[in-house]
Image: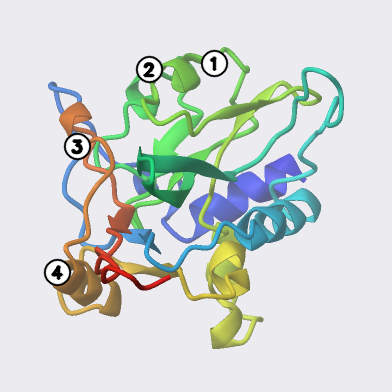
Amino acid sequence: MIAWLRSLFEAEAGAPSARAEVDAQGKTETLAKQLALVIDLDVCVGCHACVTSCKEWNDQGAAGPLADENAYGAEPTGTFFNRVQTYEAGVFPDTETIHFPKSCLHCADPPCVPVCPTGASYKRKADGIVLVDYDKCIGCKYCAWACPYGARELDEKRQVMTKCTLCVDRIHDAKLDAADRRPACVKACPTGARLFGDVADPASAVSVTIRERGGYALMPEWETRPANRYLPRRRKPAPEQGTP
């Protein structure tokens, strides 16, 4: 299965030439196409449908099985490509609950790629997706230490590093209907909080939405140029005095 996954990941981009070139400064070239997720924080309700659908698809698909060696113990461990962090913001009584989904951001300059000693981590030229070649991964965790977003996880059973693939085995599957060629998390989201498309195309629906809504990259100070974007929450008008 691992060998098949490797051939699948490289088929769309053309074997070794699919990997993005890295210059002397460790920067990758600008790609003509960059698939990515756009997360609308204004409508995310923290239902975890994206988490469960991601786990279901990838656990039984090309990337799996994803081990949960101690899922319900005092110190639970598990392998997830996507997680939702929920926290309270503001000062009482003016507080609000924020749900913040996070997965691999498929950076234009992914720090996980140059630190990999075996070349297992790579970025495809065809669509900008950052992937892991399980046949080459030795589970050294260098990529996890280099990633400022905490997007890499070790599969304890197989001892390989795992991450979001944007469901690469799904979005390029010609046997599926066009409506199904989207990441599992996007298809499962009940509120439409997750958008998917080419952020390098200024005319794409996701690029238009980013411009109109002021979409932003997570932690730009790291200069990784994340492909994924977040749409900010809209400010809700303060209730009038005397209204419940």
- Give the position of the C terminus as an image quadrant: bottom left
Name the front one of labels 1 and 2.
1
Q: In this view of the protein, which residue sits in the foreground, 27 or 227?
A: 227
Q: Say whether marks 3 and 4 touch (CB < 8 Å).
A: no
Q: CA distance from mark 1 to mark 4?
A: 36 Å
Residue 46 image offset from top left, x and y in percent:
57, 56
In the picture of the structure, the residue carrying the numbered disc 2 is 115
Which callout, 1 or 3, points at the residue further toward the start of the chain?
1
- Is 201 placed left or right of 189 in the picture? left
In the picture of the structure, the residue carrying the numbered disc 1 is 141
State the image quarter where residue 104 is shown.
Answer: top left
Residue 103 versus residue 188 in the image, above or below? above
Q: Say whether marks 1 and 3 touch (CB < 8 Å).
A: no
Residue 174 image offset from top left, x and y in percent:
59, 79
In the picture of the structure, the residue carrying the numbered disc 4 is 211
- Is 123 placed left or right of 109 in the picture? right
